[in-house]
Each structure stands twice: as C-alpha cells, then as structure tokens.
Amino acid sequence: MIITETSANGIVIVALEGRLDALSAPKLRGSPPVADPKTAVVLDLEKVDFMDSSGLGAIVGAAREKGDPACGIVLSCMNNKVRRTFETTNAQRLFHIFDDTSAAVDFAATRQIART
Amino acid sequence: MSSIITLTLPGDPLFTEVARQTTTSVASLLTGENRSASDETQFIHDFELAISEAFTNSVKYAGEHDTPPTVTLTFEIEKRRLTVSLLDANSPFSIDTPAPDIESYPENGYGLWIIRKVMDCVTYRREGNSNIISMSKTL
C-alpha cells in the first residue's frame, strides 16, 4: 500500500493506494499524522482496491485515539468495495464521509477552528 | 454437477493475496449469464472479502511455528452457487460471534461477523484436529 501525505487549509490529507489488509494496516496505524492524537486527518480512500476488517480496524482504532474521534479522521472518496466493509459493520456511523476530498478538508478545517 | 478445486497454501500472511486472487478468479467463473454487472461485481467482491477474513483469522490463530502450518481451500463450483471451505489445524472456534460493539471503536473482532453478513450460508465443523469453515453464496 502506498501512503501519500499532503496538506490543504491546515489539514493533513492521507491518500491510500492499494490493498488495506492485515499486511498493510500496521503501516497505516504507524503513519505519523494518523498516529498523532492531536492531528486531524482527511483519509482519501479513492484508490484503495481492497479493504478487509484489518484495514477497517486500523482506521477505527486510529479514530478512537484522536481527541475527537468523529472529526479526528474524516473520510473521503469511499468506493463501493470500501463502503461494503464499512456498512457490514455499521462503522460508517462513526465517521463523517464526503464524496470529494476538498469538501472533507473544508469540514475538518471548520471543526478544527471550532475546537480552538 | 459441480466442479471441485483444492488449493493448499502456507499459513503465512503473504499468501492471503494468493487466496484472495484465486477466489476472485473462481468466483468470476459463475458470472456472465445475463445477470446484472453490479450483482456479479458484488458476488465476486463478497467472496474476496470473506476469504480474506477467513484466511487472515487462520494465520492469526495458528500460533508460532518454525514452518507455517498449511491452510487448504476447497472451491465447489455449481451453476449459480459457489462454496469455499477453509481447513486448518488450529484450535476449535465458534462462528456465532456477536455483532461488533461499534460505538466502542473496536480495532479487532470484525472478521467472522463480516463473513456471516456477506455470505448466504456459513457453517463450521470440527473433523479430527481440523477446523472447516464453509462459506456459500448464490449468484
């Protein structure tokens, strides 16, 4: 899995590409912006080919460790394969999910300002 | 009339992808008979997901070994139905796991729940020292 970090409007965007499974989930959990409880992250899932419960667990676990779980990780560009894994577990209820990354960044930035 | 394919793999996480890709290829054999493309795509993906969960669990609970134990996949292909069985020599387990308590943000414990949600039928039996979990779905 390839992890690319960029930023916009003061928010870190972590874009994932490839398979998010038991082999790659630890890499995501160890990614500094994802692991840092104080950093709000937009997770761009558009190029995730496959995600099983190990990948889901990595995202949910990282969100739990954020100060504000529902806003600490904001999800964008979720494709049907990824959506299936979220919806079979109801995990989509835990997150704000946007169809495009710029809207997710705007939301995360607004929430960050509201907290400061 | 059905066809049977058997594949034995090392119980190593590196081979999860082989299990997944093989399952995708086998599930694709059932498609292409005027069913909707979205149903076919969902059918293939659900098997890919279920086998990834089952194989990952098998590797996870195999414990420490100098040589990885094996995991055997058996594919039973019927006209509209696919059954994939996974055999390992791990300790017995139950497939009747509760739904994950999602509000507590759990990091683990989703695998068997997902398998049961995306398959039509999931059974478990113990034969000698082996676990056999069978997962079926009709297209």
Image (cartoon, coloured by chain):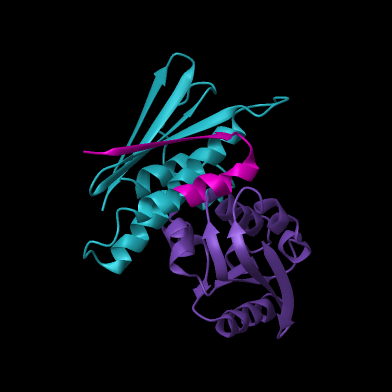
Which hue is chain A drawn in?
A: purple
Residue A91 coordinates in the image, percent (x, y):
48, 57
User: Which residue sits furthest top?
Assistant: B128
Label the cyan chain with its letter.
B
Residue at (23% x, 48% y) in the render? B79
Residue at (60% x, 43% y) in the render? B15
Q: Nearer the viewer, residue B65 or A107?
A: B65
Image quarter of the C terminus of chain A: bottom right
Q: Is residue B55 magenta?
A: no
Query: Is residue B110 among what the camera can see?
Result: no
Vertical placement of A18 versus A103: above or below?
A: above
Residue B1 coordinates in the image, percent (x, y):
21, 38
Vertical placement of B9 versus B42: above or below?
A: above
Query: Is residue B8 among what the camera can see?
Result: yes
Report the number of numbered marks: 0
Span of residues in magenta: B1-22
Q: Nearer the viewer, residue A28 or A65?
A: A28
Residue B77 coordinates in the image, percent (x, y):
30, 43
Residue at (70% x, 55% y) in the render? A29
Vertical placement of A104 versus B73: above or below?
A: below
Image quarter of the N terminus of chain A: bottom right
Vertical placement of B26 versus B57: above or below?
A: below
Residue B45 coordinates in the image, percent (x, y):
41, 56
Q: Is residue B21 magenta?
A: yes
Q: Nearer the viewer, residue A59 or B17?
A: B17
